[in-house]
Image (tube, rainbow, N blue to C red):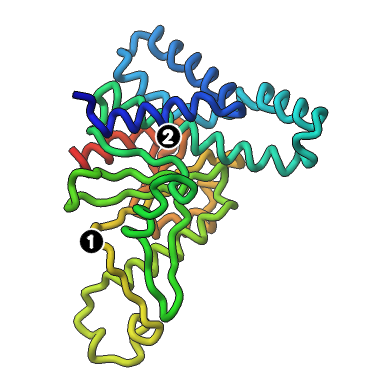
Amino acid sequence: MVNPVLAELRTTLNNLKSREYLKPTIAEFNEKLDELISERFSESEAWVIVLDHLTEIMRKSQENVEKIIQRKIRDGEIRDASQSRVAVAGLNFQGIITYALIQNILLGNLPKVIVAFRPKQSKYKKTLEKYTEITVGDETQKPDVDIMVFDPNNESAPVVVYSCKTSLRERAGQTYRWKLLYEMATSKCEYIEDSDTCPIKKYKISFSGKRRVLVGFITADFYDEVHSPQLRGMLSFFDFNYVSKPNIGLEKVRNLSKIIEDLNEIFG
């Protein structure tokens, strides 16, 4: 009998492989993987270590991605090459992370969980809303989610959402604002009911999700911003912070390969 989770993951994997802009990045990814295996890492080890080289892989694939953009410009399919480059880089980064996580599951490095790519634009939109929607007065707030990881068969397991950006300049702000709302909405502070000035009561903040939500930020750090104290300050709001480069050496920011260790701890 086919495992439905694995079947769903293989469908996502095939969809990623068919994305025209992502193909050059997957090709560079596979080359790096072969290089690591040739250095005497096992296949299992290589699939983890390669996560620390996604920034390098993204940069190496830029030339071939640019060829696709220029062809589409000539064919009249797109008009603004600059805007397309930014959009494609972001999507490719999200896509290659999803690709690597799914492959690690299929290889046995991770438990059998769903890895949803861009869940707001997928069949998992309702699932995302169910677990992450926060009410603020008459409005609702949702996090900026590029990848969602969850176990569909275990309602007591957390939901993990990731914002994946090529730089710290991008929309990390939206995600950590949601995280602050989430911390308030799930607060067990004993003074909430006693104080009308408490922000939770004042702004009518509430959360009805049945699962704990963990929030991670993943960056390619194209502009070497992660060592800037001002930009790094926002990362303290997240449960996990990763950079897809080797040898980061920061207390609150880890190499992306550590995501395997963390997901095993959460879902193992």
Q: Nearer the viewer, mark 1 or mark 2?
A: 1
> If you read the primary sequence from the N terminus, does the residue marked by circle 1 or circle 2 appear first?
2
Residue 65, how many percent across, how many down?
66, 26
Where 75 falls versus 243 (above or below)? above
Q: Residue at x 39, y 63 (%)?
A: 179
Is residue 21 visible to us here? yes
Disc 2 marks a residue whose amino acid type is Thr
Amino acid at circle 1: Lys
In the visual, does 58 lie left or right of 245? right
Q: Quadrant of the N terminus?
A: top left
Residue in view at x 18 percent, y 47 percent: 154
Q: Is residue 213 left or right of residue 35?
A: left
Q: Which residue is the site of mark 2?
A: 98
Q: Quickly name the residue at label 1.
A: 210
Residue 47 position in % (x across, y down): 36, 22
Q: Does 32 appear above or below 40?
A: below
